[in-house]
Image (cartoon, rainbow, N blue to C red):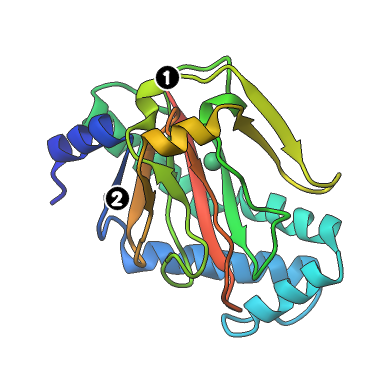
Amino acid sequence: MINLSSIKKKFNNDGYVVIKNFFLENEINKFENSLISVYSKTLKMKIDKKNVHKVISENEKEKNYDLLYDCYKKYKNTLPFKKVSKKLSLVSKKIFNKKFKILNSGMAIGIKNSTRTAYNWHQEHSYYKRLQDTIHYQFPIFGSTSKNNGTMSVLVKSHKLGIIKKLKNIKHSKKSINTYLPTSINKFKKKFKEKFIVMKRRDVCLFHEDIIHKTNKNKLKKIRFVPIIRLKS
Ligand SMILES: [Fe+2]
């Protein structure tokens, strides 16, 4: 049984909370199988749980960005995402005493030494300016998240700043993600402590729309795959 009131307390205090062993083994398996299936079909080759890291890394190296984006777009709308979104909506209702609907889904992909899909410091709220009370979940598949594989870090309690208005939009190339970096980030980094979100298989991290966070560089050959589910109230 998960302790809902302690989750809410930690979330309100720190702007994030890791819920241990939240998922069933089978739920994570379904995410992995679906990823293998979508990437095999789209890349038109035999992919399995062993070679998936190598295959995607090579496509990234060869700059097959459109093809990789195609895989990503197909994958993030598959059935496991829909089912888990429902589960997370229900548990969010219990935590916060209000209803949540799915906003969207996605996945963080950490490829060795690549910065194309890595976010610098930002708040989720900057991407959903017109919305209030969005909440964000992420969890690893195909293994854990660690400092070495570039897991997200957060500035603990920085959600208490509220939405930050002064931002600089950073985009390294046309086919890179863009980061809404707060212009006063150095000040915020001094004020709040950085915490690396370490998660094992089946854990999930729930985080606040106003917490400042970023992705880190993956130093390992194995890709870091982290599905993301966003809800709105
Ligand atoms: Fe983010």
The residue under label 2 is which amino acid type? Val
Residue 120 screen position, x and y as percent:
60, 44
Q: Looking at the image, is 13 positioned above or below residue 44? A: above
From the image, tell me which residue sits under label 1: 162
Q: Quadrant of the C terminus?
A: top left
Does any portion of residue 29 appear in the rendered image? yes
- Helix, strand or loop for disc 1: loop
Q: Looking at the image, is 60 positioned above or below residue 151? A: below
The quadrant of the rendered image in which ligand 1 is seen is top right
Q: Give residue 8's quadrant in the image.
A: top left
From the image, tell me which residue sits under label 2: 18
Q: Looking at the image, is 34 positioned above or below residue 174? A: below
Q: Residue at x 69, y 80 (%)?
A: 54
Q: Give residue 44's quadrant in the image.
A: bottom right
The residue under label 1 is which amino acid type? Gly
Query: Going from the N terminus, do you reach mark 2 or mark 1 first?
Result: 2
Q: Residue at x 48, y 59 (%)?
A: 151
Q: Is residue 127 toward the left or the right of residue 173 in the image?
A: left
**Marks 2,1: beta carbons within 8 A:** no
